[in-house]
Amino acid sequence: MSHTDEMVQIKTEALGAIQHADSEKVLQDVKVKYLGKKGLVTGLMKNMKDLPKEEKPAYGQQVNDVRQAITQAIDERQAYLAEESLNQQLAEESIDVTLPGRQIANGATHPLTRTIEEIEDLFLGLGYEIVTGYEVEQDYYNFEALNLPKSHPARDMQDSFYITEDILMRTHTSPVQARTMEKRKGKGPVKIICPGKVYRRDSDDATHSHQFTQIEGLVVDENIKMSDLKGTLELLAKSLFGADREIRLRPSYFPFTEPSVEVDVSCFKCKGKGCNVCKQTGWIEILGAGMVHPNVLEMAGFDSKRYSGFAFGMGPDRIAMLKYGIEDIRHFYTNDVRFLDQFKAVEDRGETTC
């Protein structure tokens, strides 16, 4: 076979292979076979050494013509295959714009979060600051700075998770109050609420949990009286449970306040007549409060003869259970969608009170 016949045969085979290539990968293999460094067209140039000198230019031009013809055929086939691939993809991924849209299920604010935000909004409107603190706390700020020295029997009221002898999971958010007063270096006024998680060793049942939330409030200034506390708590009760609610204060004991009181709100279900919610008493206990103990003020650097204050603490978990008729505190933490979905309608209606 002459060199010219070999050239024609290679060109014919290459163009046929290009035309039958059904994918870009197969086409690439054809390109390497004929136009690669060790390809058949490149190999034709080796025949130059056997040709007379006068025939070499014409032969070289013929090889270049074959290379260009094959290159052009490859480019055209590649463009065709790319268009075919795009058309196939568009057909497979086509969207029927006449179909109705898919409805996206909207969530709702968790009832516990709703309650906390409602309380925060009230106190922000009264000029309070929202202050947060450490959940892993020093024993000093959790107890001693709150008039609870290591030997104090009232520590038994709060069974605690200790990490070391001096470090524990906080049992209330009161350490935030102690740290805030300490930072103010004995200068008032202080007007804060402290929301957050707290931890106590307690058996999990329908009304108790080892982890729950608390919101505590603190006001320290000159001439703060028990009547200021009562007025604040009345406003809180009416905001949470309805404008016709009343409160009553019962003497109690807390080591960090003196005097101390338990605060009850008139039952929102029976209007004070007695029912299963209030256990036939007409009243529901919602929080504890009192005037800040002089020892707490002095340990934080405040002059207890010049400054006085009040403090209160409530459990948003309990308040949310009362507001929304929730019987088991564990529903707040199990994330059962069936439970959470019940509160979407409440949120859509914009309900905030019982």
Image (cartoon, grey):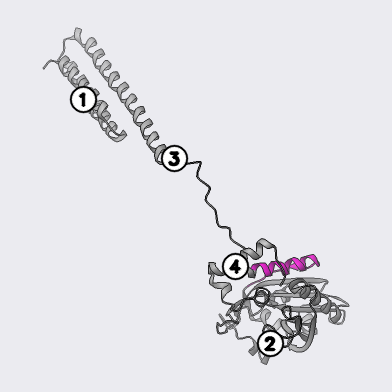
* Quadrant position of the C terminus in the picture: bottom right
For label 4, the residue is: 342
For label 2, the residue is: 279
| Relative depth, front residue between 42 and 213 | 213
Q: Are marks 1 and 2 in contact (CB under 8 Å)?
A: no
For label 3, the residue is: 94
Query: In the rendered structure, which disc, 2 or 3, sits on the residue that comes first in sequence?
Result: 3
| Distance of label 1 from label 3 (alpha carbons) | 43 Å
| Distance of label 1 from label 2 (alpha carbons) | 98 Å
The x and y percentages for residue 157 are 65, 88
Please provide the residue range marked out in magenta: 113-134
Q: Are marks 2 and 3 in contact (CB under 8 Å)?
A: no
| Relative depth, front residue between 166 and 324 | 324
Tell me, yes or no, whether the highlighted magenta stretch contains residue 209: no
| Relative depth, front residue between 57 and 197 | 197
Residue type of the residue flagged with mark 4? Gln
